[in-house]
Image (cartoon, rainbow, N blue to C red):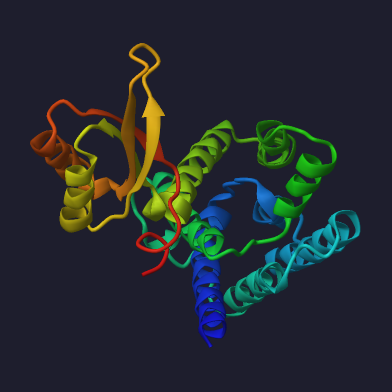
Amino acid sequence: MTNKKDFIIQNILITVGTIFLHVGFYFFFTPNNIVTGGVTGTAIVLKHFNIPLSLTVLVLNIIFLIIGFIVLGPKYGIKTIYSSLIGPAIIFIFEKTIPPTFFIDKLTETPLLISTLLGSLLTGFGLGIVFRNGGSTGGIDILQNILYEKLHMGYQTVFILTDGAIVLAGLIVFKDLELFLYAIGAVILFSTIIANVSIGGRAGHTLFIVTEKYDEIKAAIHEKLERGTTITDVMGGYSNKVRKLVICVINKRQLNYARYLINEVDPDAFTFIVQTKEAVGLGFSRH
């Protein structure tokens, strides 16, 4: 029951994320010819030759799904197939009901700047939601996985060969250096937003506390921070003394209070703190 409920919630959120993504793409990137890579960026380039956006996205997504299935096997589940098909459907509905300039026509000052910012925010937020819930937009992502897994290319190299090439194609087709620079800025901005939305909410800090008062510190963490701890023996390399190491993962908001608690319980404790990119499990990704 829980798995079915989680599956439904995840797909609802993937749908919401996909809608945000394509609102940003259709209403802000498309009317200004801001080519940011991916299948959607390719669609903007081909729109210059009067090929409908939804048709380009649908055809390319299907082609990459087939290639991915042949080369990588059936690793792309229902979520990837769903996102690959719902995206073109959303764009098609927009094309038939609302012109892409609907919002841009109402802007009187710096429309290109505003479009870049809003398009990046909506695209980054939408993709972040999709990735956070285990989804994928398909398309170029599949090609990038093939290059990464089969040819063992580094991610940055793969990115330059795929998305970078599409952004460059935008410069060649539209012959506008200003648009090219805005596109690069948009890629940087929405990539940052994707990282923060997809895993930022699960990021935190890990405390490593070497102390002789481990019971007291453990109790303070359990009672005041409501976090679990792991305790193990460690040996000092210089002193050869065995002491206890308390390990605890906390969220970002608890860091300063954790420092205060440790200092209050044991001012002589040796603590080092590392940033944790993602913490999953009870208390972080589920309750």
The image quadrant that residue 169 belongs to is top right
Residue 2 coordinates in the image, percent (x, y): 51, 83
Image quarter in which the C terminus is found: bottom left
Front-lying residue, 223 or 56: 223
Farthest front residue?
241
Q: Is residue 119 left or right of residue 224?
A: right
| Closest to the observer, 275 or 89 | 275
Residue drawn at (45%, 52%) of the image: 199
Residue at the farthest left position: 264
Query: Residue 286 at what x, y percent from top left?
Result: 41, 67
Q: What's the residue at 79%, 35% (across, down)? A: 152
User: Which residue extends farthest right?
Assistant: 70
Seen at 51% across and 60% down, the residue is 132
* Residue 21 vertical position relative to residue 264 in the rendered view, above or below: below
Residue 100 visible in the picture: no
Residue shown at 57%/74% (left/top)? 94
Residue 190, position as x, y percentages in the image: 48, 47
Percent across and percent down for residue 180 are 58, 36
Please indicate whether residue 19 sits to the left or right of residue 146 in the image.
Answer: left
Up-down relation of residue 67 to residue 86 (above or below): above
Q: How many marks?
A: 0
**Residue, far bottom:** 1
Is residue 260 left or right of 49 when viewed as pictured?
left
The answer to whether any part of residue 225 appears in the image is yes
Q: Is residue 125 above or below residue 95?
A: above
Query: Left or right: where does residue 9 sit relative to residue 237?
Result: right
